[in-house]
Amino acid sequence: MPTTNLKELSEMPELLSGGHAACPGCGGPIAIRQALLAAQQDDSYVVTSSATGCMEVVTSIYPNSAWRVPFVHSAFENSASTISGAEAAYQSLKRQGKIKKNIKFIAFGGDGGTYDIGLQALSGALERGHDFTYICYDNEAYMNTGIQRSGATPMGAFTNTAQAGKVGYGKTQTKKDLTAICAAHGIPYVAQVSLHRSRDYLKKIQKAVNTEGPCFINVLSPCPRGWRCKPEDTIRLCELAVNTRVWPVYEIENGRLSISYKPSEKKQKPVRDWLETQGRFKHLFSPKNEHLIEKIQEDIDTRWNDLLRREACDQQN
Amino acid sequence: MPERVAKTGNDAAAYALKQINPDVVAAYPITPQTELMHKFAEYVADGDVDTEFVQVESEHSAMSAVVGASLAGARCCTATSSAGLALMWEILYVASGSRCPIVMPLVNRALSSPINIHCDHSDSMGARDSGWLQLYAENSQEAYDNVLQAVRIAEHPDVMLPTMATLDGFILSHTIEALEVNEDDVAKEFIGEYKRDYSLIDVENPSTFGPLALQNYYFEYKKQQIDAMDAARDVVLEVGREYGELTGRDYGFLDSYKCEDADVIMVGLGSTMGTAKEAADRVRSENGIAAGVLKVRCFRPFPASEIADALSGASAIGVMDRSVSFGLGGPLYHEVRSAMYGSQTPTADFIYGLGGRDIPLGDLKDIFVQLDEIRKEGKAEPDVRYVGLRE
Ligand SMILES: Cc1ncc(C[n+]2csc(CCOP(=O)(O)OP(=O)(O)O)c2C)c(N)n1
Ligand code: SF4
Ligand SMILES: [Mg+2]
């Protein structure tokens, strides 16, 4: 049985080595490292791909590589189609008796490479039913190219392409719900996870890689540089994102949704608390913009209530 | 015994794919390539191949998937035309840079805009710098033979580069011709087994593919690719010779038709060169013009010195271009001119057939007559001429 015990995991060999070039406090390497440890256990091996983006760049600067599992990077928009080809090769060679190993395929992509430019390739790979897991590390902007807005950037966040100024207040549109889009493909397993709930994250990874067919996991991934937050706050911010319900954690297994954690009344926080922690939202606290905070809160409440309704409905059936 | 069959160019290429029996094929439909994949899908449905047939949602994903599969140690093919190749463009470079010996029949078609489904060579010419080998076919027989040889050339350890085997859209892809196909086991033995040194699914020896290589390493990477393309020259010839011994059909860089004693030579690519041979015969008997035809079969790597040799006896040269580099002229013309550097032989560029505009025998005979005038005048003015264009 694969383990999610942190002590046991800490004794296993690292599959993403240290020494890569990510900024201090970056959520991305934590997400990748834990996913690899959870997935490559017992007699299973992992083969990975990544879209162009921060995690690809910081981990594979020739002649070095932080990857101790096979890894391929091809381009920005094709992590899913690249891994689908590798998985097809595996199926073909396995059928012909040329390979015997049990391999789990994991594709990584940032929000830009997943919500935006790679959405078509992801959708195609999910629809075709390849046996793989796609993990999106969502840091809510194109960070590698210097913090530009993406479909995952929340309303009001400052980016270099949606700035705050005399009239601008950051991104004017709301965040795309990619997890729902993936779920709409009718794939067997979809989850949204948070790095502060490590056990839950590891379990969900294991569920995904051990489920036959395409699975999708979305993990919020703080970026101290783009979010203008403190590197030491990464995990605290993940917790706050969940308690403000900015980032609900839930899973949809064979079409049934269940929320993995609901903050108690005592734990639940207003979105204001979340916005305050990050420089990218600073301008929202000026008198001209403050009304937006209410709007953002409303949007969060609506999305949360939708989730609750969906969960109740799925539990009845 | 090899069998004589009647097939369209698409079916001939599909038949070659069936005999290759690739581990993975990923493809997306586009006219005029569609029937090729229909035929291949039939082989899949009948269990004639072991192929994992990945029916992707775009050509970008088709090329991405075969790159992933090729790195994983699978023998891979795809096929496309025109806009499909254009959409693959980014990943064509990834395929060659990652040294993936993917084989791709390309059914040549014009690029938009205006949208047009018929043959010209703008699609493959746009990819001539992408690090892929390019073989052009005059007829379905050559299309079939080229696809089979492409596997051997691409996967040769000194090469390990992707290869496209082109055939003219509709003119070849949709025309039934008689051709000779090899027996399955002969084809199988000829192409052999694919093995790559490093594989993405060799989980016990994990490797990183497609790293970031900056100012300090990228250049060396590219030099290795340049060297591989150079090494492909010998391999193209070697494989062509071996294929000749097997089938009686020899292949090299060029196919030279009556060039030895020719005063005027027409140089070109693809199906038009078949008609050009007939035109050469006609003007020899009807007009007394010593005409020859030099068909370029292998366009990448470009056989510059062989072309210069083959043209060295001519007094006038016409280069046939079925595509344009806007602001420069025909790409083949400019490459032939530079292959002929130092030569004083007058050379003209004949741009023809864009968007499938027909090039009948009469037009080709007329080009030989023009070349004969150029020969007499000792100069080609104008040097760029448009064939069959309504003014
Ligand atoms: C086709 C293409 N367009 C644009 C780029 C430039 N580009 C590289 S990474 C990147 C942003 C990546 O953003 P994301 O996927 O969110 O990953 P992050 O860097 O934030 O981790 C962009 C725009 C590219 N490499 N390829
Ligand atoms: S810019 Fe952000 S996402 Fe990129 S490495 Fe630094 S912290 Fe991580
Ligand atoms: Mg991002």
Image: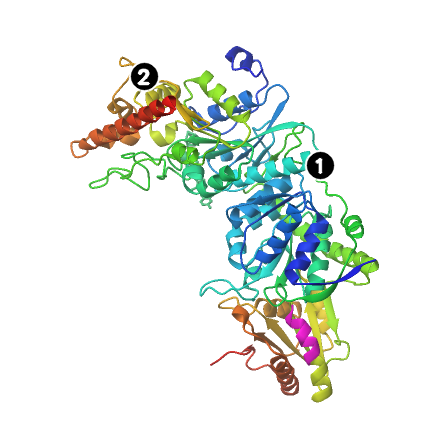
Q: Which residue: 42% across, 33% down?
A: A183
Q: Which residue: 71% across, 49% down?
A: B20
Above or below: residue A123 compared with residue A271: below
Mark 2 against mark 1, which lies toward the viewer? 1
Query: Is residue A155 on the magenta stretch?
Result: no
Decide if ligand 3 comes within 8 Å of the CB at mark 2.
no
Percent from the top left, x then y, of residue A177? Answer: 36, 34
Percent from the top left, x then y, of residue B203? Answer: 65, 29
At mark 2, the secondary structure is loop
Q: Hey, which residue is sitting farthest top in the picture?
A: A7
Q: Residue B333: tell me if it is visible.
A: yes
Q: Hey, which residue is sitting farthest front in the picture?
A: A317
User: What's the magenta bit mostly, secondary-structure-wise?
Assistant: helix
Above or below: residue B246 compared with residue A309: below
Q: Nearer the viewer, residue A162 or A89?
A: A89
Percent from the top left, x then y, of residue B108? Answer: 58, 62
Is A254 situated left or right of B7 in this image?
left
Amino acid identity at mark 2: Pro
Q: Mark 2 falls within which chain?
A: A
Stretch in magenta? B271-279
- How packed mark 2 is, by other alpha carbons closer than 10 Å (few <14, some 14-19, many 20 or more), is few
Q: Quadrant of residue A105?
A: top right
Above or below: residue B207 compared with residue B192: above
Query: Is residue B273 on the magenta stretch?
Result: yes
Marks 2 and 1 on same chain: yes
Circle 1 sits on which residue? A96
Q: Which residue: 41% across, 35% down?
A: A184
Circle 2 sits on which residue? A263
Q: Nearer the viewer, residue A307 or B102?
A: A307
